[in-house]
Amino acid sequence: MKRMCGSIGRKAISFQNVCSAVAAIFLALSVTLIALPDVVYWLFSLQGNDLGNFLTKRAGVLFLGLSILCFLARNSDNSEVRRIVSASVGTATCVMALLGIYELARGNAGAGILVAVFIEIVVAALFLRIWIQTAPVK
């Protein structure tokens, strides 16, 4: 039986399930950014260009790396590994959500950015909860 992150008074979240789901999301995002950057432009109401395509494809490679990280870490029983992955991915997705809201407020992105912001907030919240649940007992 897979170990769950412990928590008193709350249902524990499975690190394995969160990492598996996030790995799949990041893989889908990676493929989309690399192969279909126009989908991103459409969703965020942006106008594509050569520089945008270049940066979008490079971002896709970064998401591929994050996908592999989450996938390979999903079965780790080491609480330090779980905390590192949770802090890293949680921080990245939280900051991406903040930047998405900021760019929407500035008028640089359309309302479609809220889809990404919602997913980023959920992922950040899940990893924050795991990070808290795996805190060393003093």
Image: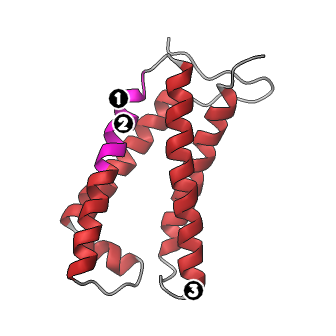
Query: CB under 8 Å between callouts 2 and 3?
Result: no
Residue at 22% across, 71% down: 54
SS for callout 2: helix
- Secondary structure of the residue carrying tag 3 is helix
Residue 13 at x, y percent in the picture: 61, 31
Identified by mark 1, the residue type is Leu
* Disc 2 to disc 3, C-alpha distance: 33 Å
Name the quadrant containing residue 9: top right
**Spatial distance from mark 1 to mark 2, Cα to Cα?**
5 Å
- The picture quadrant where one finds residue 86 is top right
* Residue on which the image places disc 2: 69
Whether residues under marks 1 and 2 lie with C-beta atoms below 8 angstroms apart, the answer is: yes
Assess whether mark 3 and mark 1 are in contact (beta carbons under 8 angstroms).
no
- Label 1: which residue? 72
> The residue under label 2 is which amino acid type?
Leu
Q: Disc 1 and disc 3: Cα gap in Å?
A: 38 Å
Q: Which residues are magenta?
A: 64-75
Q: Quadrant of the C terminus?
A: top right
Discs 1/3, front = 3
The residue lying toward the viewer, choosing from 118 and 55, is 55
Q: Residues within 10 Å of mark 2 (few under 14, many from 20)?
A: some
| Extreme residue in the right direction | 9
Left or right: 92, with 131 as reference point: left
Q: In the image, what residue occupies the spot 64% across and 25% down?
A: 134
Asked if the magenta segment contains residue 99, the reply would be no
Is most of the magenta stretch helix, strand or loop? helix
Location of residue 124 with respect to 60 vertically, above or below: above
Give the crowd class for mark 1: few <14, some 14-19, many >=20 residues within 10 Å. Answer: some
The residue shown at (31%, 38%) is: 68
- Disc 3: which residue: 106
